[in-house]
Image: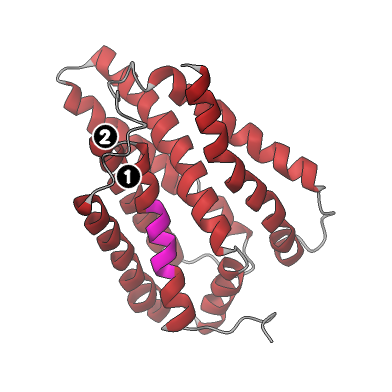
Amino acid sequence: MNLYELLLIIVLLLPGLLLMAINEKNLYTNIFTDVPLPSFGLRFINHVILSVPFALLGLFFYKRAGFEDAFSLTGMDSPTLVLSLLCAFVNVIAYYFYFKKNVAETTYKEVEETRQQMWIGTRCFYGGIVEEVIFRFGIMSFFVWIGNLLTSPSILSIWAANLLASLLFSLAHLPGIYQMKAPVTKTILFYSFTMNLLVGLICGWLYWQNGLAAAIICHMLFHLIWYLFEKFVFRFPIKNET
C-alpha cells in the first residue's frame, strides 16, 4: 500500500458514496415511511464505514494475492467490452422476459418504482465502483490470499475466492428485496440471486484477468444497458413522473 493507491481508492469511492447518501433520501421516504430520515452526514458516514475497511483490505492484500496489475488500464479492451455487454443483455432478457412475466403486476410495479428511484449515476458510481472495490478488490483479493496459503495451484484459490465473493455479493442484495413493500416470492429471490451471482462471477473473472478497471466497466455497463432499455424500450411510468 502506498499514498498514491490510497488517494486513488478515495477518488474512486467518493462519487458513489456521495450520490448514494443523497439518493437515499428518496428511498427512505418511499420505504421507511414511519422512520425518521437520518441526516445526510449520518447516511454518508454509514457508507464510509461499510466500504472503506474493504478498500483498505484490498490495498493490503491485492499484491499478496498475486493481482500485481489491479490498477492497470490495459485490460479495458474489446474482449472486456464484449463480455460486459453480454452480461448486461443476459440480465435484460432475464428481467423482462422471465421476471416480469412471472410476478404479479402489482409486484412488478413496486419493484420498478423502488428501483427507478435509484438514479443512474448512483447505480453506476455506487454499484459499478463502490461494490467492485468492496467485493472484488477487497473481499476476493483477501480470499485468494487465504486460498494460496491453503492450496496449490493458485487457480483453485482464485476460482474459489471468485465464487465466495460472488455469493456474498448476491446475498448482500437480499435485504433490499425484503425492504420493499411487494411480497417476496421465489421468482424475485431466484432472479436476484442468479443475476447478481452471474455479475459477480464475470466481474471477478475480469478483475483476475484484466484488473479492477475491467470489473468496474462491466458493472457500470450492466446498469447503463438496463437503464437504456428501462427508458426507451420497456418504459414503465412511475408515480412521481409528470
Q: Nearer the viewer, mark 1 or mark 2?
A: 1
Badge number at residue 208:
2
- Residue 98 magenta-drawn? no
Q: Nearer the viewer, residue 130 or 110?
A: 130
Q: In terms of image quadrants, where is residue 94? A: bottom left
Q: Nearer the viewer, residue 132 or 78?
A: 78
Left of 62 or right of it: where is 3? right
Horizontal and vertical percent for residue 29? 76, 64
First in sequence, mark 1 or 2: give its number. Answer: 2
Horizontal and vertical percent for residue 146? 33, 18
**Which kind of residue does numbered mark 1 sit on?**
Ala
Q: For the C terminus, give its image quadrant.
A: bottom right
The structure residue drawn at horizontal position 30% and vertical position 67%, both measured from the top left corner, is: 89
Q: Secondary structure at mark 2?
A: helix
- Residue 223 magenta-drawn? yes
The structure residue drawn at horizontal position 71% and vertical position 54%, both measured from the top left corner, is: 22
Up-down relation of residue 163 to residue 83 (above or below):
above
Q: Which residue is mark 1?
A: 214
Q: Which residues are magenta?
A: 219-226
